[in-house]
Amino acid sequence: MAVDAGDVLQDGDVIKTYGSTLIVSICDGALITVYPGTELVVSGLGTSMANLTLRSGEILGDSMAGCGISVSNVVGTANISNGVYGVVLSPSGNGWTLQVRNLDGTVTFTGADSLDSSSMAISLVEAGKTIDVPVGEEVIIRGIYDSGMDVFALSTGGAAMAMISDETVGEMRNDAIEMSAIASTGPMTEPTAPPEETVQGGKPSDEELEQIVVEIPWEEVETASGKG
C-alpha cells in the first residue's frame, strides 16, 4: 500500500521505492534516504539501534552517536555507529556488487555465513570476519549469488578497499545536508508519486527544493573591526 508522510514504520515492514526517493527517520533522529529502485526491510527498531535488510538498491544514512544501524544482506552486514554512510547493492542477474561507504563515521563490515571465499587464496572479506571501513573509503565486493544454495561466491579479485571518488563524496555530503533540511522543515508542497509506489516522507522535485528556505538569524553587533 502507499505510505504517507508521517506514517510510522513497524518491525517487518518492507519498503519499496520505484521512481520516488523517501526519507525515513528512525532510532531517535537517525535519518536514512532510500533512493529509487530500492527494496528495504525494517526490523529491530528501537531507541538505540535499528536493523535493516537491503535486498537491492541504495541507501544513504546519517546516524548520530548512540544510535547503531546495521544493514544486512546475503553478502554480509555493515554496522554503523555514527556519521554519514552509504550502502549500494546492485544485482545484475546472479552477479551482485555490494558497496559499503564510510564518509565520516565509524563503519565495519562482517561477512555473512552465506559468503563463500574458498576460491580466494587470500580474501579481504570472509564469512564471520569483521573488517573496518576507514573514513573516506569503501569496500567493494563482487560475486555470484546462488539463491537455491543460498551462497554468495566471490568472483576472482572480488573484494577490495578503495577511496570514495571525489564526485561520490560531494554527492553524499550534499544529499546528507538536503536530507537533514527536508526532515527538519519539510517540502513546501506535497510530492506526488504513482499510486503503486511506496513512499515515506518523500524527496521533493528540483522545483520544490527551490522553495525550501532556511533562515539564518542575523543581528547587528559591535565588533573589534567595527564592521558588525
Image (cartoon, rainbow, N blue to C red):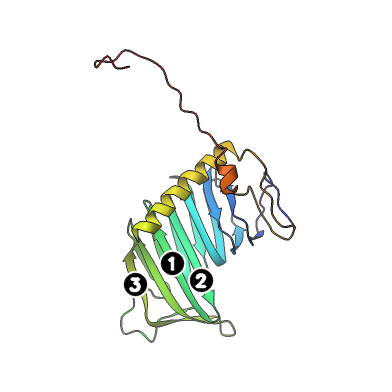
Are the residues at dot 1 and dot 2 in contact (C-beta closer than 8 Å)?
yes
Which residue occupies 36% across, 51% down?
104
Outermost residue on the bottom side: it is 119
Mark sitting earlier along the chain (3/1): 1
Q: Which residue is mark 3?
A: 160
**Of label 2 and label 3, which has the lower sequence position?**
2
The residue lying at 43 percent from left, 63 percent from top is 100
Label 2, on which residue? 90
**Residue assigned mark 1:** 99
How far apart are the alpha carbons under marks 1 and 2?
9 Å
Kindly identify the amino acid type of the residue bearing the numbered disc 3: Ala
Mark whose residue sits in front, 2 or 3? 2
Q: Is residue 63 visible?
A: no
- Residue closest to the far front: 207
Near mark 1 (Cα within 10 A), the count class, few <14, some 14-19 or many ≥20, is: many
Residue 205 locus on image (x, y percent): 59, 49
Badge 2 marks a residue whose secondary structure is strand
Q: Is residue 162 visible?
A: yes
Q: Quadrant of residue 108?
A: bottom left
Q: Secondary structure at mark 1?
A: strand
